[in-house]
Amino acid sequence: MTSEFDIIRRYFTRDSSAVLGVGDDAALIEVAPGHHLAVSTDMLVSGRHFFPDADPFKLGHKSLAVNLSDMAAMGARPRWAALSLALPEVNELWLQKFSEGFFALAGEFNISLIGGDTTRGPLNICVTIMGECKPGEALRRDGARSGDEIWVSGTIGDAALALAALQGRVSLRPDELAHCEQALHAPQPQVGLGIALRGIATSAIDVSDGLLADLGHILARSAVGAEVYFDKLPVSELIAARLSDASARQCLLAGGDDYQLCFTAPAHLRPQVLAAAGSLNVRVTKIGRTSEANGLILLDALNRPMDVQTRGYDHFA
Ligand code: ADP
Ligand code: MG
């Protein structure tokens, strides 16, 4: 018989940088003097955020990656994580692979797992991430000013295209699917970029629910509008080749799960934006500008407003 405590000890207890880590009633952490603690939680539910038979290594990676992405979007330096797991049964191989995936990414970013909860129930993975940022340096959603340039890191749409293919809504060749599945199952959070954009970006968000919806959150919180140029949106060759297809456009504009950063910065700081991204070898693309007007206007290559009927992902819509 494997007990709850065996699971915690075997799979989730590692050295940590905390004052007190796994094993007591609460962890104790010491935040760097004069810093704020940035805290965020993201939950992955079986059948909703991932297929029940998903590869456990990739699930371990992704459950931490989506949380790291929130730290990236704040410009915070992630340091600690708590992991709450509901498991239908004790599956040693699953736990081994899941924890390997989780700790592989944690190691990359020097994250300590400092606590959590383990219980029986329908498979559910909830991670709380904690990080540090200096007061006044966090990249909030409410800082965009009219006339700022709007940027996106990496390429977007591939993760949603993979999901569409796995659900049988579009058909892809096996090599194409393999490429997009990487974006869907193994997103690389832009932690370095978020930190490098401190003092440069006026606002930021990670693209988890779809570009237009997530940019819309920045616009609403900052009380500005935006013009976005459709033909400037950074896409992979796969999406580029399919842009005449409505479902590919939907993936690009409203597909979630890419975990790239969308951010705004004043036009005169463009060289700093490019230098920050360039030093990290991250591609950033200017996709538009914020405006005084309300709402978001998507313009085609001839500067004509496009009909935007796409919405981002909403669990209750
Ligand atoms: P309590 O009964 O006080 O809630 P638990 O028995 O649930 O404590 O947990 C024991 C210790 O193991 C605590 O330090 C808790 O934070 C940690 N823990 C439980 N589950 C996990 C997990 N999945 N990953 C990391 N730490 C965990
Ligand atoms: Mg508990």
Image: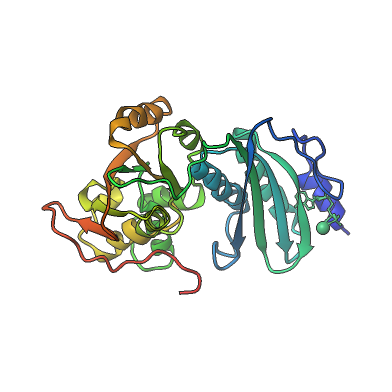
Query: Taking the image as drawn, is residue 138 in sight?
Result: yes
Say which residue appears at 32% left-offset and 37% top-offset.
266
Q: Quadrant of residue 317?
A: bottom left
The foreground one among 280 and 224 is: 224
The single residue placed furthest to the left in the displayed view is 302
- Number of labels in the image equals 0
Task: Indicate whether 185 appears above or below 269.
Answer: below
Say which residue appears at 38% left-offset and 46% top-offset.
144
Q: Residue 164's x, y, as percent? A: 39, 63
Task: Indicate whether 115 appears above or below 50.
Answer: above
The foreground one among 311 and 197 is: 197
282 horizontally vs 69: left or right: left
Say which residue appears at 27% left-offset and 46% top-offset.
287
197 horizontally vs 108: left or right: left
Q: Quarter containing ligand 2?
A: bottom right
Q: Quadrant of residue 177?
A: bottom left
Query: Taking the image as drawn, is residue 260 in sight?
Result: no
Say which residue appears at 69% left-offset and 54% top-offset.
94
Q: Quadrant of the N terminus?
A: bottom right
Q: Residue 194's x, y, as percent? A: 48, 37
